[in-house]
Image (cartoon, rainbow, N blue to C red):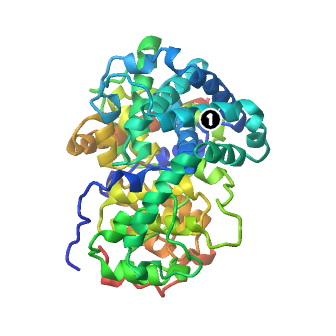
């Protein structure tokens, strides 16, 4: 088949305007999305409800600006990221420092034995996840959360972050490698503990 | 994104184990709603701390705009929201986790709003070729916020839209395009609500045409590899019709978008786990390169070979 393009056009706004049910659903979605992403972006549990409120307030106030030209979800992510970075800044840098010079040993031959993470119970795994995410530099962490955890597209993530798609792809590769390396270290840590 | 760029086994195992661990609980969501109701009621007086945070990104949502009042309809919505919450609709939330009470109240208050749009929808719908409405049980052109714009476009993929529209009842069969379903672990907001269909009457369901519009939009975009548009349409469908007739297809579309764009295959895997015998499963397995070893037992070999997307809507 010949390549087709959907004609890029701005759809008349009336046709995209949400009805009451959709507004309601968008609001609910914002809550869920903000809650889980803020946690993963390093907002402490103690202030999480406040951070979610901040997101909702911005969504609520700026809802009229959102014209539906892209995904509502993507738009909300932008708000979430900004709120998260604000909270992180005020919380101070109390996390492990990532050493960019440290060789990323995730390219080592993968272990044949099942991953110790498989049998982690959800809450424990979530704690580990947060800790490992905390080892990532902010920009890399954000890309990881958006693409790997929230499954946004490269384009959407790039627009949320205000970077080019190429930069986003490159950051994603770094994010994956870095996260893999963190997992490998964590796994080694666990195995050392268990073997004691 | 090549699959080789995807995560290591350990990383994937960790993500799988942690899945859902950050989701908000129903109780917590109620608390959030209640707190927000108080804030929304005093909208103008609450400091917008988020907006004044120094910006790091230039994303659309962070552009500073002169603060202005919400347009009237939105303001009505905000008050309706606050009013509804304070009248105890949270009880309804707690009971069935759905927003049915909320929705009913909002719809009432926003009656004029949707009425305006319905009018516009009707005008646009009238322009639609009659053939597009050739679907049983869709007697009326009127819908809430339909997307007739899609129908107006010179549809490049004829083979995807015509059979799709003419065949809505069996539209779940994959045609030459590849709509697919995936249950997205992260779309819990949509799947968690047992959202009742908007009209429970026996009359032709006007929301069905709106649902179809969204799905067709998503399908076409997917076939044209316009993944951003496909996602946008599919996500809208997830919001409005979380358990709609085309939910499976929508989830498949979302899974395919994720795989193709970034190689992220969690939702694809989740879809296959939940619906190994789905008509879209074969497509997803192939496009997402999942192989058959992830599906224990039964449907190790695709059981539905009648969908020959060989003419490759790629």
Q: Which residue lies furthest to the bottom in this view?
A: B306
Neighbours of disc 1 within 10 Å: few (<14), some (14-19), many (20+): many
The image shows residue A95 at horizontal and vertical percentages of 45, 18
The residue that appears at 34% across and 60% down in the rendered structure is: B260
| Residue B158 visible in this rendered orientation of the protein | yes
The residue that appears at 51% across and 69% down in the rendered structure is: B209
Vertical relation: B294 (above or below) A193: below
The image shows residue B218 at horizontal and vertical percentages of 40, 64
The image shows residue B57 at horizontal and vertical percentages of 29, 28
Q: How many labels does the image show?
A: 1
Vertical relation: A44 (above or below) A183: above
What secondary structure is marked by label 1?
helix
| Residue B176 visible in this rendered orientation of the protein | no
Find disc 1 in the rendering and name its residue: B81
Most foreground residue, B32 or B80:
B80
Most foreground residue, B269 or A158:
A158
Displayed quadrant of residue A182: top left
Please indicate whether residue A129 sits to the left or right of residue A107 in the image.
Answer: right
The residue that appears at 48% across and 65% down in the rendered structure is: B252
């Amino acid at each position: 088949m010949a390549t087709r393009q959907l004609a890029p056009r701005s759809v008349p706004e009336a046709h995209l305007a949400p009805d009451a049910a959709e507004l309601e659903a968008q609001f609910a979605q914002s809550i869920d999305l903000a809650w889980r992403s803020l946690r993963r972006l390093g907002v402490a549990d103690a202030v999480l409800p406040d951070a979610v409120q901040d997101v909702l307030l911005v969504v609520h106030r700026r809802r009229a600006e959102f014209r539906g030209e892209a995904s509502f979800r993507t738009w909300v992510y932008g708000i979430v990221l900004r709120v998260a970075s604000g909270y992180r800044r005020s919380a101070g840098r109390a996390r492990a420092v990532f050493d960019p010079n440290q060789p990323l040993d995730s390219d080592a031959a993968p272990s044949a034995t099942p991953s110790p993470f498989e049998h982690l119970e959800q809450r424990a795994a979530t704690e580990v996840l947060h800790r490992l995410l905390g080892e990532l530099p902010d920009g890399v962490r954000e890309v990881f959360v958006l693409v790997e955890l929230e499954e946004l597209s490269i384009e959407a993530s790039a627009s949320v972050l205000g970077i080019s798609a190429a930069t986003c792809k490159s950051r994603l590769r770094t994010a994956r490698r870095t996260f893999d390396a963190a997992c490998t270290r964590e796994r080694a840590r666990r195995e050392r503990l268990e073997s004691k | 994104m090549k699959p080789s760029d995807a995560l290591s086994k350990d990383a994937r195992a960790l993500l799988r184990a942690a899945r859902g661990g950050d989701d908000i609980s129903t109780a917590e969501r109620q608390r959030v709603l209640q707190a927000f109701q108080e804030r929304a009621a005093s909208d103008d007086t609450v400091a917008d701390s988020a907006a004044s945070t120094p910006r790091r990104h230039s994303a659309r949502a962070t552009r500073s705009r002169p603060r202005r009042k919400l347009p009237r309809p939105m303001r009505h919505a905000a008050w309706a929201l606050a009013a509804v919450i304070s009248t105890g609709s949270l009880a309804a939330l707690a009971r069935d986790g759905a927003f049915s009470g909320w929705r009913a109240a909002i719809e009432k208050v926003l009656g004029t709003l949707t009425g305006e749009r319905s009018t516009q929808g009707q005008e646009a719908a009238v322009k639609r070729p009659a053939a597009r409405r050739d679907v049983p049980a869709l007697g009326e052109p009127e819908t809430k916020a339909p997307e007739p714009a899609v129908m107006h476009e010179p549809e490049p993929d004829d083979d995807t839209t015509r059979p799709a529209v003419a065949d809505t009842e069996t539209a779940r069969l994959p045609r030459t395009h590849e709509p697919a379903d995936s249950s997205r672990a992260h779309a819990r907001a949509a799947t968690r609500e047992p959202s009742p269909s908007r009209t429970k009457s026996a009359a032709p369901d006007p929301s069905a045409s709106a649902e179809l519009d969204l799905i067709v939009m998503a399908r076409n975009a997917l076939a044209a590899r316009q993944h951003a548009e496909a996602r946008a349409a599919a996500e809208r469908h997830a919001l409005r019709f979380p358990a709609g007739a085309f939910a499976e297809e929508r989830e498949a579309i979302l899974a395919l978008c994720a795989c193709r764009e970034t190689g992220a295959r969690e939702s694809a895997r989740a879809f296959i786990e939940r619906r190994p015998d789905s008509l879209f499963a074969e497509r997803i397995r192939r496009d997402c390169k999942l192989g058959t070893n992830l599906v224990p037992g039964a449907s190790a070999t695709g059981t539905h070979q009648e969908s020959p997307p060989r003419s490759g809507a790629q």
